[in-house]
């Protein structure tokens, strides 16, 4: 085949969503409360469909099941990764995710380790990233007494920042932030706190206090990541993370840049600019917001233009 598989975005309406997926990326969103573009997904809550080539019209979960050769003949029962673009028009709930063992036992799906690349952030924007409780007893006390200012650790963010968010990390994306999220293929979220806000029907959203207490890492740990940069002419390849779940890169392309395969498949999303992907003299247009998979038989490719890409691979 030796061709990319471009994927149709799947939009998710959220209480905290907005309209910037249209204004920034040009997506044809159904309303102005869209919080997430599931850009590359085989999760049953939003499955990507291939838009081009030999497998046009195929759902990604079916490809994973029926054409494992595209992905290097993996043994995992489900496609392990999920790529999103999030538009936080308002604060997301304070939440935490389980690890694989807890997720499989209690929810029947993978746990959720994730990471964030900050595409944009309003001045003064913050995330919640960790907590101040020293013991689980202190965590329980602070949660039940709703001492959120004492418990939650806030961190200012700016465009271009990167954060690794392992399972067990209390976190929240703040108002005015747009991110690209690379995560395990899971939709399990335990809400710790939701600002007592109400949905369109006047109802508060469910919180999951016991599950949150069960899965939160205490004391909190701030992951140490080793960011590496390689120059290729005027372009740069930044490695943000290498983990057992996924490896994540920023490709900052200026001119023509050659890539060689490093993993059975690569997930790619254009977050800025435009250009061209060339595989075996076949050319494919790349525009802001485009997402695609480079399958196992693509050994090398070039990208030309001026564009910024977030790419990821399965971990080892």
Image (spheres, rainbow, N blue to C red):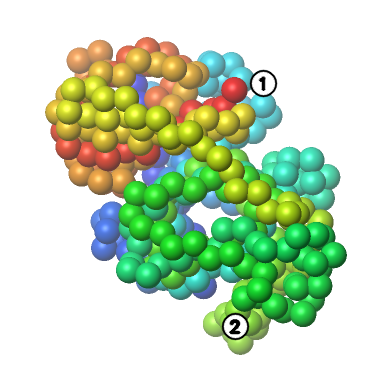
Task: Identify the element where label 2 is drawn.
Answer: loop
Task: Answer whether labels 2 and 1 touch (C-beta < 8 Å).
Answer: no
Residue nearest the observer in this picture, 125 or 255:
125
Q: Position of residue 244 (x, y in %)?
A: 61, 29
User: Dividing the picture into quarters, in which one does residue 262 lie?
Assistant: top left
222 is higher (above) or lower (below) than 254? below
Q: Position of residue 267 (x, y in %)?
A: 43, 32
Residue nearest the observer in this picture, 96 or 128:
128
Mark 2 crowd level (few <14, some 14–19, many ≥20, 10 Å Cα): few
Q: Position of residue 163 (x, y in %)?
A: 49, 48
Residue at 62 percent of width and 45 percent of height: 166
Q: Is residue 184 left or right of residue 52?
A: right
Residue at 35 percent of width and 36 percent of height: 250
Cα distance in 3D space between marks 2 and 1 = 43 Å
User: Dividing the picture into quarters, in which one does residue 270 lie?
Assistant: top left
* Residue at the spot of label 2: 198
Q: Residue most toward the bottom?
A: 202
How many numbered discs? 2
Mark 1 crowd level (few <14, some 14–19, many ≥20, 10 Å Cα): few
On residue 271, the disc is none
User: Dividing the picture into quarters, in which one does residue 252 lie?
Assistant: top left
Q: Position of residue 316 (x, y in %)?
A: 59, 23
Which is nearer the N-term, disc 2 or disc 1? Answer: 1
* Residue at the spot of label 1: 75
268 is higher (above) or lower (below) than 303? below
Residue at 62 percent of width and 76 percent of height: 149
Q: Is residue 290 left or right of residue 86?
A: left
């Amino acid at each position: 085949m030796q061709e990319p598989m471009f994927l149709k975005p799947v939009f998710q309406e959220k209480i905290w969503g907005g309209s910037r997926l249209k204004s920034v990326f040009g997506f044809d969103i159904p309303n102005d409360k869209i919080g997430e573009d599931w850009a590359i997904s085989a999760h049953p809550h939003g499955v990507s469909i291939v838009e081009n080539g030999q497998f046009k019209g195929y759902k990604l979960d079916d490809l994973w099941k029926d054409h494992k050769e595209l992905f290097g003949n993996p043994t995992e029962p489900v496609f392990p990764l999920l790529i999103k673009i999030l538009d936080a028009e308002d604060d997301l709930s304070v939440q935490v995710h389980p690890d694989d063992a807890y997720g499989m036992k209690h929810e029947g799906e993978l746990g959720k380790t994730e990471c964030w690349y900050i595409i944009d952030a309003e001045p003064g924007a913050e995330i919640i990233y960790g907590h101040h409780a020293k013991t689980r007893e202190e965590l329980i006390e602070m949660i039940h007494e709703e001492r959120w200012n004492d418990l939650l650790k806030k961190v200012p963010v700016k465009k271009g920042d990167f954060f690794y968010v392992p399972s067990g990390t209390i976190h929240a994306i703040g108002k005015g932030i747009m991110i690209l999220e690379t995560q395990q293929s899971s939709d399990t979220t335990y809400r710790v706190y939701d600002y007592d806000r109400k949905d369109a029907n006047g109802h508060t959203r469910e919180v999951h206090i016991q599950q949150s207490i069960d899965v939160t890492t205490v004391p909190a740990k701030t992951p140490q990541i080793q960011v590496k940069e390689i120059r290729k002419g005027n372009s740069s390849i930044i490695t943000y993370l290498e983990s057992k779940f996924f490896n994540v890169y920023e490709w900052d392309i200026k001119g023509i840049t050659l890539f060689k395969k490093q993993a059975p498949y690569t997930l790619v999303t254009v977050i800025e600019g435009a250009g061209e992907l060339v595989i075996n003299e076949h050319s494919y247009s790349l525009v802001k917001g485009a997402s695609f998979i480079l399958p196992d038989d693509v050994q090398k490719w070039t990208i030309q233009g001026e564009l910024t890409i977030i790419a990821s691979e399965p971990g080892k």
